[in-house]
Image (cartoon, rainbow, N blue to C red):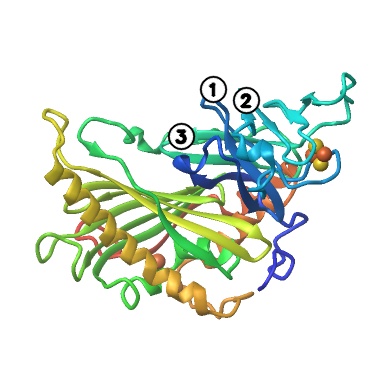
């Protein structure tokens, strides 16, 4: 596995940004062991409904807070109380901010008994974490995913787990500029437009092409605006047989190892009637088509060697710029602007639209 250092990304091993860590239904009052950013952590949902992410190891004597099935604290269902979590070893309890608030056999509770906590937000059926090696507050807001989740006429996404891939996040984000792979891998045809636009912490891909199977009629085009807000997940508004909204997340587990998920919401009607089972079945089938398209990339990533420097052609699309853009998240926040300034702007790789001057 090639690491952030091998790719020369910057001072930090792990990037700054919002990252998916779990589907919302994985956060329950039964604490779960998770590992991201090279750290063992525990995800649980307080009895208030609020999700919490804390370091895995108890400051008392180092027990893992979630990897236990035989302690009476776990067997008696006493591990989560309110927003607090209790250690299975000696029963010390930590509140939602990580401070120890109860030791079963001592009135004295040391101030130093503090669990590290991480910033998490639940949105659109997903638990998101702000990760920042400098420990600062979020640099940008977590987006609202087109405001389509729970919106009238839209069917919510289900989460497709796509695997733990032995590939660095940079190679997943390379896809944004990868004009050359859409025809051979994904079955695109009759491209009319492909461009990228860099805007500070956001990079867009604008795409118009036909497809062998995904369009309703011959000659139709799939029109996509796809973007990353930060390094952790892709969003895409797609106009095709249905209007839909794609989310693809990649989160580092360790340096060079990425967990990936896919999800898609579909607009099945204009909101003027009830959504029925046939609508939901159509949306699920549409999501499955999109999942299979992403799985075509995943198979490549599962099996490739690291690409530290592409042997790039001009028509490949601006990989180089994507990689410079990506570096802003691996360096102190104060340096982000210097990377943004080097890439900000529009790069058109292909334009054969009838009204285009380049045609
Ligand atoms: S190790 Fe956690 S309470 Fe002792
Ligand atoms: Fe792809």
Residue 178 in view here: yes
Q: Residue at x 32, y 66 (%)?
A: 293
Q: In 3D space, how far apart are the residues under numbered discs 2 and 3 (Cα atoms)?
A: 19 Å
Q: Residue at x 67, y 50 (%)?
A: 67
Instruction: Please tell me which residue lies in front, 157 or 277.
Output: 277
Question: Are dots 3 and 1 in contact, CB under 8 Å?
Answer: no
In the rendered image, which residue does mark 3 sit on? 123
Assess disc 1: are there few (<14), some (14-19) or many (≥20) residues with their C-alpha within 10 Å of its C-alpha.
few
Residue 342 sits in quarter: bottom right
Q: Nearer the viewer, mark 3 or mark 1?
A: 1
Q: Residue at x 81, y 32 (%)?
A: 114
Image quadrant for the N terminus?
Answer: bottom right
In the rendered image, which residue does mark 2 sit on? 83
In the rendered image, which residue does mark 1 sit on? 48
Residue 359 in view here: no
In the picture shown, does residue 351 fall above or below 65? below
Assess disc 3: are there few (<14), some (14-19) or many (≥20) residues with their C-alpha within 10 Å of its C-alpha.
some
Question: Are dots 1 and 2 in contact, CB under 8 Å?
Answer: yes
Q: In 3D space, how far apart are the residues under numbered discs 1 and 2 (Cα atoms)?
A: 6 Å
Q: Residue at x 45, y 55 (%)?
A: 261
Residue 320 sits in quarter: bottom right
Residue 165 sits in quarter: bottom right
Instruction: Please tell me which residue lies in front, 281 or 3.
Output: 281
Residue 208 in the figure: left or right of residue 327: left
Residue 335 in the figure: left or right of residue 52: right
- Pointer 1 or 2: first along the chain: 1
């Amino acid at each position: 596995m090639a690491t952030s250092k091998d790719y020369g990304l910057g001072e930090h091993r792990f990037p700054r940004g919002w990252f998916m860590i779990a589907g919302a239904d994985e956060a329950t009052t039964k604490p779960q062991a998770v590992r991201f950013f090279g750290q063992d952590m525990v995800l649980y949902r307080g009895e208030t409904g609020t999700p919490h992410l804390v370091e895995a190891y108890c400051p008392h004597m180092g027990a893992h807070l979630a990897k236990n099935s035989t302690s009476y604290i776990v067997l008696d269902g006493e591990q989560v109380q309110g927003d607090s979590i209790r250690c299975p070893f000696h029963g010390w309890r930590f509140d939602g901010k990580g401070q120890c608030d109860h030791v079963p056999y001592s009135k004295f509770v040391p101030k130093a008994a503090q669990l590290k906590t991480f910033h998490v937000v639940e949105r659109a059926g997903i638990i998101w974490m702000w990760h920042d090696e400098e420990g600062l507050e979020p640099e940008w807001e977590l987006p609202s995913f087109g405001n389509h989740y729970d919106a009238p006429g839209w069917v919510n996404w289900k989460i497709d787990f796509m695997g733990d891939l032995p590939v660095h996040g940079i190679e997943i984000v390379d896809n944004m500029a990868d004009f050359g792979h859409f025809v051979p891998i994904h079955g695109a045809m009759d491209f009319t437009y492909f461009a990228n636009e860099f805007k500070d912490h956001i990079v867009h891909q604008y795409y118009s092409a036909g497809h062998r199977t995904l369009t309703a009629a011959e000659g139709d085009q799939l029109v996509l605006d796809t973007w990353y807000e930060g390094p952790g997940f892709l969003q895409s508004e797609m106009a095709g047989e249905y209007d839909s909204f794609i989310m693809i997340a990649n989160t580092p587990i360790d340096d060079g190892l990425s967990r990936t998920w896919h999800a898609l919401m579909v607009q099945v009607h204009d909101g003027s009637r009830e959504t029925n089972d046939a609508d939901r079945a159509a949306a699920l089938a549409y999501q499955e088509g999109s999942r299979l398209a992403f799985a075509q990339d995943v198979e490549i990533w599962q099996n490739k060697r690291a690409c530290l420097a592409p042997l790039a052609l001009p028509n490949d699309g601006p990989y180089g710029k994507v990689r410079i853009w990506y570096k802003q998240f691996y360096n102190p926040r104060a340096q982000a602007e210097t990377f943004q300034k080097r890439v900000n702007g529009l790069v058109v790789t292909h334009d054969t639209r009838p009204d285009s001057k380049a045609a």
